[in-house]
Structure formats: structure tokens, C-alpha cells
Image (tube, rainbow, N blue to C red):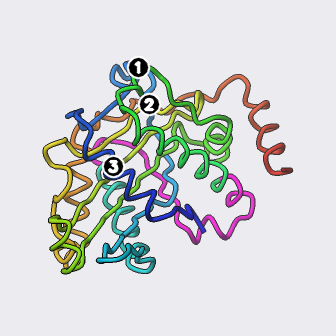
Amino acid sequence: MLRPLVSALLAAGVAALLMQPASAGMHATKEFEAGDTRPRTVAFLPPHATLIKRKVIKAEEQIEEGAELSKFLAASVKNEFAKQGYEVRMLTPDEVNANRELQELVLDADRRYIELLNQVRLKLPRQIAARRYQAGDEMRVLATKLGVDAIGFADLVMIASAPGALFLSGSGTQQMLTVSVIDGQTATIEAYFVPPALRRGAFTGYEAVIADPAGKIGDMAGLTLRDLPPAAATARAKPDNDNDVVSDVESLLKK
């Protein structure tokens, strides 16, 4: 039910990231690095893993395999944040689908994040430091609804070439894992994590991931989030305009 993305668009986004010269694994605002906007509590929308099989003539998304990998991605990302002291709530598709109000809020936030993610992937992520990426009311409303400091997103894209396509393209499996933290009060992307430039692309083969998804995806998450700083000492107080945010919730649900 989440993220009805086109495979070609995902593949283009991964290709753009692989060609980016930036070597940093974390792109963040100065305030996040200093700890001023670093959260204590984070709610992650259901992480999304997309597996694309590239054949000689066309590329096909493997829906069922991607759904299974998403579960391992959720566990791995939650584990990495927990290691640094974050209180993590990892939403599941079943949890979201069981609550109509939450479902609508998640869909709105997810849709807005996809728009931002495509901008970040196709432009330099260092613009995050300049606070160029604003997610809007959808994120503030969802953070208030869930009672957290920040909203998190994790996206894994794997492109695996079939034997014939491998011969023509010269490349096997390519992966890109991205993780974002969006402030629940300002709706700004405060931190964006990708693997270091030298470790992008063929991190590990498709067959190896399928054989040991927990281990391999855990390795990817650990590498991607290796620069994640410790959580803030305490959760942030609710903003003074909390009543306004509640009104925003009601307005969004009436659309």
C-alpha cells in the first residue's frame, strides 16, 4: 500500500547516487551535528526494500522478495539506532493498515518524502546542511500524532542483473541504502545517510543477500549508519503551538 514507485525511476535514482562525488556517509545540518536538533525519539515509517531484476530486454520489480527484505531492513535500522541510545518506534504495514487515521497520515507523509528523496538523489545531498529540503506539515502532524521528536525513513534499492543482462551491462548487483531523519517540529531533513562513496554499488551479491538477509542487510545498515551520533539526552518538549498541529491533523483528515 506504500510507495507505488516505478522501477525505472528507482533505478535512475540509484544510478545518480552512485555517480555522486560526495564521499561522506552522513549529510546533516550543523544543528544536528551539534546536538541541538538531534532527536531522542524517532518513529520510522515502514522501511521499503525494492528489488529489481534487470533482464536483457526489461527490468522487473520483485514485489514479494522486496517485502521480505523490508522486514530485515526494519530490524537492522532499528538495531543501529538503538545502539546509539535512540528510542525507536518502527511502524509496520499491518499497524498502519489497522488504523485509518494513521494510514492517511502515513500516506501523506510518505508521498511527500518520496518527492524530497528524488530531489536529494538527483541533486547534491550536501544541500541538506543548507536546510534546502522541507517536508511540510505532513511530517509535523505525523510526529505529533505519534508523540516523537522525529520521523525516520529507510529505503533499500537492489538492482540484480540476470546472466544475459550481466554480459551486456558488465555489472552484477548494485545496492543503495538511504536513511533520513526529519525533525518533527520544523519538518526539515536534519540528517541523510548513505554508504561511503567507495562502498557504493556492488557491496555484496544478490545471491548472498537472499541466502543471509539478516546478516547482509545488517552489514549494509551498519556501514550506512556508521556516522550516526548518539541520541539527544532527553526527548524534546512539545511545541507551544501544539493545538495548531492538532488542527492540522483534523484538516488533513478532512481532505
The x, y position of residue 12, in whole percent, is 38, 53
- Residue type at mark 1: give it: Glu
Nearer to us of marks 2 and 3 is 2
Coordinates of residue 101 in the picture (x, y in percent): 74, 58
Against 126, residue 215 (above or below) is below
Q: Which residue is mark 2?
A: 190
| Residue 228: assigned label | none
Q: Which residues are magenta?
A: 81-105
> In the rendered image of this protein, does residue 124 appear above or below residue 205?
above
Q: Is residue 142 above or below residue 245?
A: below
* Lower position in the chain sequence, tag 3 or tag 1: 1
**Which residue lies at the image location 40% right of the left edge and 73% below the top edge?**
66
Examine the structure image and report whether residue 108 is included in the region drawn in magenta.
no
In the image, is residue 89 part of the stretch drawn in magenta? Answer: yes
At 65% across and 69% down in the image, what residue appears?
A: 97
Whether residues under marks 2 and 1 lie with C-beta atoms below 8 angstroms apart, the answer is yes
Q: What residue appears at the point 35 percent right and 77 percent down from the top-left corner?
A: 57
To which residue does mark 3 refer?
82
Element at badge 2? strand
Quarter holding residue 104: bottom right
Q: Choose between 123 and 71: the one closer to the eye.
A: 123
Q: CA distance from mark 2 to mark 3?
A: 18 Å
Q: Is residue 85 left or right of residue 249?
A: left
Q: Nearer the viewer, residue 207 or 141?
A: 207
In the picture, the quarter occupied by the N terminus is bottom right
- How much space separates mark 3 and mark 1, taking CA atoms? 21 Å
| Residue placed under numbered mark 1 in the picture | 31
Q: Position of residue 102 (x, y in %)?
A: 68, 57
